[in-house]
Amino acid sequence: MKLIERYIFRMVAGAFMVALLMLTGVVWVTQALREIDLVTSQGQTLRLFFYVTLLALPALIMVIAPIALFIACLFALNKLNGDSELVVVNAAGMPQWHIIKPFLLLGVIVTLLTATIGIVVMPESARKLRDLTTQIRADLLSYVIVDGQFTQVEQGLTFHVRERQTDGTLRGVHIRDGRSADQTRTYIAEEGYIIRQGQNAFLMMRNGNINQIGDDPQRTSIITYDRYVFDLSSLTRRTGVAHRHPRELSILELRQPDPNNIYYQRSPGRFRAEFHDRLSAPLYPLAFVFIALAALGRPRTNRTGRGEYLLAAVAAMVSLRALGFGMTNLAASQAWAVAMMYGAPLLVTAIAIWLALSERANAMVLSFRLPPAVARRADAAMRTVAQLPSALGPRHQG
């Protein structure tokens, strides 16, 4: 790889990482807000909360990564044009291929990343997320132990906890167990915490006492303890066979779905749509790369407005991805939409390659003009974006 190619690759790869991290962070926050009830209402630990939200990211990164790549390509090409580096390289007689090669290499890397996530990582993470959330919601303890409330779990058994801390520690535990016909027990503890061993659960209580009342109310005994274990296994709900959603199945399982799967019986088209969506998703990174190259890959002087080409590229990318989402949803009910799931990105990629490499096509691109008012606003937006790094940097030296 030539020096100029390494320079361009470092620039676009760095921009891609920044864009990917920023977009992923925004999406992660939205997922975290959706799952915040794990901590607030169901009393789970922060560690489990972060684990659950991270499991949801692979499915979103499949969509985020190509968009981050597109943003990085536009940024790098605009910077190269703004600094007149593409003009100099072109004047030196370097073939256009040497400009395209770094972008193409990063596009291939993102394509492989997207394919790996869609085929291997995402189904596994979705399966783990489903199993974990099902276990949390199937565990009655998540609903039984509510701060400041007396909750009757079953006939004769009542729980009360004064406070549940973020680390899972329970303060002010009070349990009244009257399930036995000849004896009633009241458990009081300063603090406690739940211990899980496989399918079993126990409440470890510390610094408390047990008040036992038999048939004769006059015969009451009080037992003081430092530690006491209360069996909670009977309060955990056992779940049966879980039917998997299409997002949780591997490629082979989607290709040959289980006819007994309740979701397949309800909507077999969703399995077809999910199968082809995972196979067609890796087509978008390269399509977005060549859309950016077709718009800004040729030298543009500072006097030549680039805002209109940027708007055209963004419009093409958004339209293509929206069409892909629409065809995926339509493929659940219409089999012909499957061909469009592959055909749309392939056709756009072919057109973009022609526009990026052909001199005749480049002349057509240069002749493209937006209305003057729109072009002026687009160029003003480009200048604002170009000035952001210096505006955000330190204003004083020393």
Image: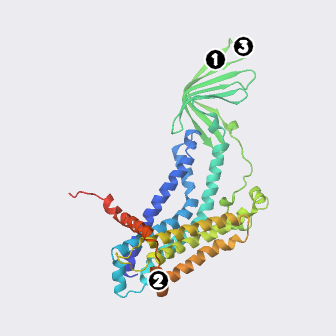
**Rendered view: 163 above or below 61:** above
Give me the disc on residue 221: 1
Quadrant holding the C terminus: bottom left
Q: Compare residues 323 and 205 and report the one nearer the observer.
A: 323
In this rendering, the label closer to the viewer, 2 or 3 = 2
Residue at (63%, 70%) from the top-left corner? Answer: 279
Residue carrying label 2 = 362
The answer to whether one can see residue 225 in this image is no
**Distance of label 1 from label 3 (alpha carbons):** 11 Å
Residue at (72%, 44%) from the top-left corner? Answer: 238
Tell me the amino acid under the disc marked 1.
Answer: Ser
Q: Are marks 2 and 3 in contact (CB under 8 Å)?
A: no
Q: Is residue 142 left or right of residue 383?
A: right
Residue most toward the top?
A: 218
Tell me the amino acid under the disc marked 3.
Answer: Asp
Residue at (64%, 39%) from the top-left corner? Answer: 201
Secondary structure state at the residue bearing disc 2:
helix
Q: Compare residues 286 and 345 and report the one nearer the observer.
A: 345
Q: Position of residue 393 (x, y in %)?
A: 30, 59
Q: Compare residues 43 and 316 and report the one nearer the observer.
A: 316
Residue 8 appears in which quarter of the rendering? bottom left
Q: Is residue 22 left or right of residue 139?
A: left
* Neighbourhood count class around disc 3 (C-alpha, 10 Å): few under 14, some 14–19, many 20 upward: few
* Neighbourhood count class around disc 1 (C-alpha, 10 Å): few under 14, some 14–19, many 20 upward: few
Residue carrying label 3 = 216
